[in-house]
Image (cartoon, rainbow, N blue to C red):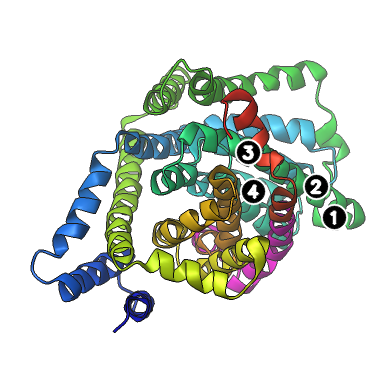
Amino acid sequence: MSFEMTAILMFVSMLVWLLTGRHIFAVIGGVAAAFSLALWGAGGEGMTFHQSISLLNWYPLLTLPLFIYIGYMFSKSGIADDLYQMLYVWMGPVRGGLAIGTVILMSIIAAINGLSVAGMAVGNTICLPEMRKRGYDKIMISGVIQGASSLGIMIPPSVVLVLYGMIARQPVGQLWMAGVLPGIMLAILFILYVAIRCWIQPKLGPAATKEERNIPWRKKFKLLSSAILPILIIFLMSGLFFMGITSLVESSAVGAIAVTVIALVNKRLTWKIMLEIMKETLSVSCMFMWVILAALAFGAVFDGLGAVYAIESLFLRWNLGRWGIVIMMQISYIIMGMFLDDTAMLIVVAPLYVPLIIKLGFNPIWYGVLYTITCQIAYLTPPFGYNLFLMKAMAPKDYTISDIYRSVWPFVGVMILGLALVMIFPDIALYLPRTLLGGK
C-alpha cells in the first residue's frame, strides 16, 4: 500500500472513530499508536511517545492553566459584574446599547483570558438576564453572546495562538501582536452590525427608558472607575510582555496574581469560590493536555508517512494557484470545524498546512491569524460548533437549539468579511509585529 493511501486510511479511521462518540484524545492517540505499531512493528510506538514527551518540555505550556485560571477568577469573583454595570449606564441610552456593551465586555475579557469559555460564562450569567429584562430580542441576545465571546481566541493573550505557535514553531509574541488589530477590527464590525440592525429594527434592542437614563453625571463618572482594574490586569499581562519586561510565562503568572489580589481587595473571593475556580481550571487544563498529547502523536505518525508531501502534491496538482490553495485550506478548516474542536483541528492539520504555506511564500504569522478567524467561524457553525453547545447548556430553557442556530449566521457573515479583509490586506495582521517586534 502506498504511503498516500496509508495516510488517507489513517485519517479516515480517525474520523470514523470520532463518530462513535469516544473521547477525542482516546481516538486520536489510539489511531496513532495502532498505525505506528502496524507500520514499524515493536518499538514503533516510541515515535508517538517521544513526540508527546517533547511537549512536556515546552516551557511556555505553563501559560495554559494560568490563562484559564485568570478567566474563571475574573468571571466568578464579580469583577465582570462591575464592568458591565458601567457599560450599561453609558451605553444603555443607545439602541442596541446593551448588546454593544456586551461586545465591549467580551473584548475586555478576551484581553484577559485567551479562551471563549469565560466570555460565554459571563455573557450568560450577567449580560443575558439584563438584556432580556429590557426587552431585547432573544435571537439578537444569543448571537451577540456567541459571536463576541469567540473574540477570546483572537485577542491576546490567545491560547489558540499559543498552540499554533507551538505547532508551527513561530514566536508567540509576534502571533499575539498579529492578533491585536484583527481582534479589534472584528469587535468593531460586530458593534457596527448591532448598531445598524437595531437602528433599522429598534425592537431588537430598545434603548433604555427615560427613567433609566436619568442618572447623575457624577455617578456615571464614578462607575468609570470599574474599568480601571481590567485595564490594569491587561497592562500587567500583555503590556509588560510586549515591553520586554516579562517573559510569556511570567506575564501569565503576573496576570494570575493580579486578578487574585484584586478579587481579595474587593472582598469578592471566598474559599468556596476559590475551590470552584481551581476545579474548573484543572478540568479544562487536563482536557487540553490530553488532546494535545494525542494529536502530537498522531502528527508524528503522519509526518513519518510523508503525508505532508502527499497533501502538498495534491493541492499543487489541482493548479489552483497560491491564493486558491489558501482558500481551499480555509474551507477545509470550516468543514472540519463542524465536527472537531479547534485544538484537535489545529494539531491534526496545521503540521500539514504550515510547511505548504511557507513553501508558497506566505507569512506563517499571517496564516496563524487566518486560522484563528476560521476557528472563530467553526465555533459558531453547526452541528459541532463549540459555542452553540455552550449556549444551549447555559441559556434559559426557552432558548431552543433552532433559536441558537438561527442567531449565529449574521455573525458568521461578519467573520467571513473579517477573514476576507485580512487576506486582502495582510498588514492588518502584520503591521504591529513588523513595526514593534521586528517581524517579517
**Quadrant holding the N terminus:** bottom left
Magenta region: 390-418
Query: Disc 2 and disc 1: Cα gap in Å?
Result: 8 Å
Q: Nearer the viewer, residue 229 or 186?
A: 186
Q: In this figure, which residue is indicated by the disc labeled 4?
A: 148
Q: In this figure, which residue is indicated by the disc labeled 2?
A: 96
Circles 4 and 3 in contact, beta carbons < 8 Å: yes
Query: Disc 2 and disc 3: Cα gap in Å?
Result: 17 Å
Name which residue type carries label 1: Arg
Q: Is residue 21 magenta?
A: no
**Farthest residue, direction bottom:** 1
Mark 1 crowdedness (10 Å alpha carbons): few <14, some 14-19, many ≥20: some
On screen, 226 above or below 103? above
Circles 2 and 4 in contact, beta carbons < 8 Å: no
Q: Kindly state the secondary structure of the residue where label 4 is placed.
A: helix
Q: Nearer the viewer, residue 315 or 168?
A: 315
Q: In this figure, which residue is indicated by the disc labeled 1?
A: 197
Tell me residue 17's x, y (percent): 32, 78
Q: Main secondary structure of the magenta part?
A: helix
